[in-house]
Each structure stands twice: as structure tokens, then as C-alpha cells.
Amino acid sequence: MRPPDRSDRGRRAHDPARRRFLHDTGLAGSLLLAPAWAVAATRDEAAPEFATRSGRVRGFTDRGLHVFRGIPYGADTAAWRFRPAPREAAWDGVREALAFGPACPQRDSGGGAKSEDCLFLNVTTPGLADGVKRPVLVYIHGGGFANGSGSDPLYDGVNLCKQGDVVVVTVNHRLNLFGYLYLEQLGGPDFADSGNVGQLDLVQALAWVREHAAAIGGDPDNITVFGQSGGGAKIATLMAMPSADGLFHRAWTMSGQQVMAAGPRAATQRAELFIEAAGLAPGDARGLLALSPEQLLEAALAKDPSRVEDRSLHFCPVLDGGALPRHPFWPDAPAQSARIPMVIGNTKDETRAWGREEDFDMSWDALPEKIRQGQFVDIPVDVVIAEYRRLYPGMTASEIYFAATTAGRSWRGAVEEAEARARQGAPTWAYQLDWPSPEEGGRRGAYHTLDIPLVFDTLTQPGSPTGNGESARRMAARMSGALLAFARAGDPNFEGIPAWAPYTLPHRETMVFDDPSRLENDPRGAERELYQRVPFIQRGTT
């Protein structure tokens, strides 16, 4: 049985713009409001239970699987603001794990509880302490480093568990200023980890998963992390964090890369702007401890110095010399993760996700300024337009805009990571999703977030942009099947797709997921070469 749905998502699920926003921020499902253990529910004496390190939890059964929501893996972070949190407090009796825990405080238009008490995870499993060593898949949600939660209905793990006999875990952690505001140079050693506590929360969650893997029916020596957008960037960062070494064994990222972290100078400059916007004296890091979450989120609206457009302060992992002693993928791939098999994916039409009505009917006069703001790398706009018109003479201004901003945005980071792994000789596979969403007559193509319901095989969940037609079902079978094969054996090949060769230089082998799928060498190679004329600088790190 499912616990009762108290959300209003059904009422709003048919708004395409809202769906795209919720997909990208990871907020579509964070809509159950009460703390997990306090929710009143119909007691079923046969409801599944297991013992955690801090007490027993009771979940519910969904389509024959054991489901637990809102299990704490760390303490309430309100008492540990800007610092690593200790483990969760123990409890007596049996704690009800029926509803998602709160998400980290964030600015968004979605519903759901939000609190600094946000260190919760959710488990879906075919068995409990049954001696079966199932692969454990831990999903890290998107929304950049600013928004989201692990409770979106598109992250429902039931179909993956049923199809592959695996365990699926989703997680909440600290975000935005709560997880990535760097204060060490202003507040001293008490704040040494402040720029990376959101990442350290994930380390703590992965340690909890390893510790409890056998109890939830999984294998502590076979843990796969996978994530989309910001989730992929968090995974790339974990691959360079010494405290994460050994906590996961495979990594699958989707349209999310983190080649560079913010340097301490740039991160401190943002902290100074933030403190000023909060109305405190210059450098008063400790004064932030007395402000409410709402006051802090308001201060974060100060303009970021590195952004062309008018955007609020950007917080991301920081090269602090401790929790993160090196850039995730610069100048090379991290040695500690060379043994970890990795899949690096992107969608062909990433930026069509954010396209406004006028962007689909753009004039040639409007194109230069739109590309200047959207391509995220510093290359002459006239050179970009001239090269696209040479390569693709039939493209409209709108088509060039979406192609150029996609190539100059997250895809460039994917190329940097894949090439660094190839030079290292680390086992790596690349994919590109070309299969288009049928929404809006297909005009958004294979846009950012489209691979989420295909990988989870959650085509019929609220907010899925795939439909449930024959072609969508084939695509979901291919992508979820590749993920499950990868989780089981560290290789995404299985009988449902063409042979998928690892990524090497100079061939750049890439699986193009389409209907039918195919393996290509260096798809969009001319676009890659265009953008590799200039150095790559990670968005928001300077």
C-alpha cells in the first residue's frame, strides 16, 4: 500500500513550464509535510521493519517491495549550521518511516516541508537482511547546488528494484548557503568545512548506506551513485574527496559535471557580499548563526559577481584544502577514483528545457546577445554564429541558439571529464540522449532532465515528459537496463543495446540513445572543437 497522497501535484501536473522547473530543481515530489516518524498511518502488523544504528524503523509495502521514507542519517543541522553534523540522535521504540523528511531550506515555488533538520534518506528494497547481496543504487538529486530533494515521484525506485533486484536509496542534504557558504577566512577554524558541508552530508549518507547495506538487502561492496544535473556535479566532486574514498564503487552522471570547484578567494568574496546583504558588519561570520533561515535565503539574492545575467549568489563546492583538497577534474581526473567505473551522459538539446516562447521564434538580430548570455564560456559570439552557419547552413536562429548554448554549457564539462578519464585509462562510458520528448509537438527535443524518467523507468509518474508510448517504453528499457547492468557488473553493456565501447581518445566512443540506439565516434565533433578553442572555466567558480 502507499501512504495517503496529501499533495496538490495532480492539480498542477499538466503545466509544462512547472514540470520543467520541478524536474530541474528536483522538487516535484517533496510535498508530504509532516516529519516521517510523526505521521499517523494505518498500522499494519506485517509492515516491514529493520534496525538502524539509532533505533528501529517501520515502513510500508508498495507493489511487493519494502519502502521506508524519512530515515535520519544525521542530526538536526540547525545546531550545526555551517559545520559537519554528528550522527542522528537515537530513539526508543519503532519510528514510523512513512513520509519523506523535510528538504533543506531553499527559494522555490514548490510545496513541501523545508527545515534545517533535513538529513534524511529513503529506501526501496526487495528484501531485508535476507542474505542476498543486491547492488545498491544511491540517487543524488538535481537542482544545482541550490534546490531540490530526494522525493520527486520521478525518483520512485520501485520499477528499478523489480526489474533488476536492486536496492534504491534517495537522499536529502544541505544545499545553497546552508551547504556551500565558505566562511573559514572570515570566521576562523570553526568554519573550516563550511564550503563543503553539503558534500560532507552526502559522505555521511553514503557511510550510513554502507553500514546498513546488509540490513536493507544490499551489498556494502557494490554501491553505485547516480545523479542528474546538480546530482552529477556532486558525484564528480565526491570522486575527489578523500572522505568519500571507498564509500561507492560505480558512478553514473547525467548532464551534471563539476570540473572545477570555487577557489577560496572567490568563495570568500561571495561570503563577504552575502554578509553585507544580511545587514551584518563586514566579516561577521558568527552573526549569521543568529539569523533565521528566511533571512539567510533573502541575503542570498545578492547579485553574483561572475554572472553575465542578473542572478543571485552562486554557492558550490570549495577548494578548501581539507574536505576538498583538489579540483574535481582539473588538471586531471582524481587518482583516488581511477578504479571506479563511470558513465558520463548528456542530452542533445539541454537548453531547450529553459526555452521561452520567443526563443523558439528568434530573430537573427536577437541571436548574438542571447548566445552571449547563455553559452557560459568566453568566446566571440560572431565566431560561434559563423561556425554554426557553416556547419549547419539550414539551421534557424533559434536552432543555433539552442545548439550553441547546449554545447557551451554542461556538455563542455562532460567532454572535459570524459577526456580526463580517458587520459587516465579509467573505465569510462559516454552517452548522448537524442530521443525527443513528445511534449509540445516534440519542439523541446531531448532536453535537460529527460533522461530521469527513462533511467528510473518512471514513465507514468506525475510530471514525466516522456508519455507511455511504445517508443518511450523501449527507451526506458534501454536506459534503465544499461544502468542496472552497470550497477551489477561495472559495465553498462547488456543485450538490449548495441555494443557500447568505453570512451577512448581520439575516438570518443559515445552511445547515442535514440530509437534505434547506436554507437558513434565523437558525435558533434565539430562543435566540440569549436568550444575547445578556449579554456574551460566552471560556471560560478570564479
Image (tube, rainbow, N blue to C red):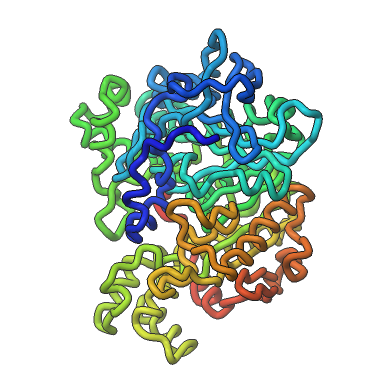
User: Does residue 259 appear in this view?
Assistant: no
- Give the camera-side residue of 62 and 119: 62
- Give the camera-side residue of 321 and 196: 196
Judged left or right of residue 65, residue 165 is: right
Residue at the spot 60% in from the left edge and 64% down from the top edge: 473
Residue at the spot 24% in from the left edge and 37% down from the top edge: 299
- Is 446 placed above or below 56 here? below
Residue at the spot 38% in from the left edge and 39% down from the top edge: 176
- Give the camera-side residue of 492 and 471: 471
Residue at the spot 65% in from the left edge and 48% down from the top edge: 160
- Is 529 placed above or below 86 here? below
Q: Residue furthest top?
A: 92
Q: Quadrant of residue 204?
A: top right
- Give the camera-side residue of 301 and 185: 301
- Number of numbered callouts drawn: 0
User: Does residue 167 appear in this view?
Assistant: yes
Quarter of the image with the N terminus is top right
- The location of residue 290, given as percent across then percent down, is 27, 20
- The location of residue 287, given as percent across then percent down, is 27, 22
Q: Quadrant of residue 360?
A: bottom left
- The location of residue 239, given as percent across then percent down, is 63, 44
- The location of residue 265, given as percent across then percent down, is 40, 41
Judged left or right of residue 16, residue 494 is: right
Judged left or right of residue 99, residue 500 is: right
